[in-house]
Amino acid sequence: MDRLSRRSRGAFVVALALCIPSLATVSIARADDIAPADARHLGVQARLLAGPVGANGSGRTSGVGVGIDFALGSMVGERLALDMDLVFARSASAEHGTLSDTAFSAVFLGGGLTYWLMPANVYLAASLGLSRSSVQGSVVHLDVAIPNAEQSNIGPGAHLALGKQFWLSQRATLGATLSAMSGFGANPTGGANTERYVLAAMAAVSLTYH
C-alpha cells in the first residue's frame, strides 16, 4: 500500500507539473497583449475548470484523478459576483484500507462569491454548501463480511479557488486555477455511522465567459 501511495502522490505531482508549462505558455503569449478598452466583467458569468485532482478521505482512502468545477452567476458590482458552484472529483484507481480496484468520488454544490482583482484579472472565489462522497471497489479477502461500496450522507462542504485569467476577447478569458474542496458526512455503511472527511485539491485550466 505504501508503494502504491507513493506512486499516487508521484502521479499527482507530475500532473501538476504538466499544468505549469501550459500556464507559462499562455502567460508569455498574452504578456504584451493589452485587454480591450471595453473588456470588463459584466452581467452573467460562467466559469468552467478542469484538471488533475488529488483526493483524500478518512478511512485510508486516497487517489489521483480528474476534477471539474462549473460556476454560474452574475456580477453584482464592478468586481464582485454571486454564483452557484458545482464541483466533481473522481479517482478511478484510488487506494482504500479494505477494498482493492477502488473508485473514489466526491461532489459539492454550493453558493458563494467571486471577487476580481483588476486590472490583474485575478479572481478569488469561495462557496459554502453541501457535499457527498462515495467509495466502491472489490472486497479484499477477510474473515468478516464488509460492504464493497460506501456512500456518505449529505453533509456540509466548502470550496476555495484562486485563478489568473488572460483576455481572449472582449468577453472571454482563459487561464489557470488552483482550488480546494472539503466536506464531511456520516458514513452509515462504513461502520458505526462514522464520519468521512474529504479533502481534494485541483490544478485546472479555467475558461470564463462574462
Image (cartoon, grey):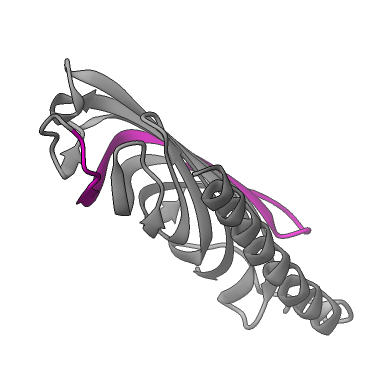
Residue 112, given in percent of the width and then of the height, sits at: 42, 39
Q: Which residues are magenta?
A: 113-142
Residue in view at x 59 percent, y 56 percent = 7
Residue 119, given in percent of the width and then of the height, sits at: 77, 59
Foreground residue, 130 or 19?
Answer: 19
Q: Magenta segment: does it hold 188?
A: no
Left or right of 131 on screen, residue 118: right
Q: Magenta segment: does it hold 114?
A: yes
Quadrant position of residue 103: bottom left
Foreground residue, 192 or 170?
Answer: 192
Residue 102, given in percent of the width and then of the height, sits at: 31, 53
Residue 152 vs 120, above or below: the answer is above
* Residue furthest front as drawn: 143
Foreground residue, 193 or 138?
Answer: 138
Residue in view at x 21 percent, y 52 percent = 138
Residue in view at x 61 percent, y 73 percent = 173
- What secondary structure is the magenta-colored segment mainly? strand
* Residue furthest top as drawn: 192
Q: How many marks?
A: 0
| Camera sees residue 114 | no
Quadrant position of residue 39: bottom right
Residue 116 vs 199, above or below: the answer is below
Residue in view at x 81 percent, y 73 percent = 24
Left or right of 202 on screen, residue 163: right
Residue 116 vs 58, above or below: the answer is below
Residue 53, given in percent of the width and then of the height, sits at: 51, 56
| Camera sees residue 92 | yes
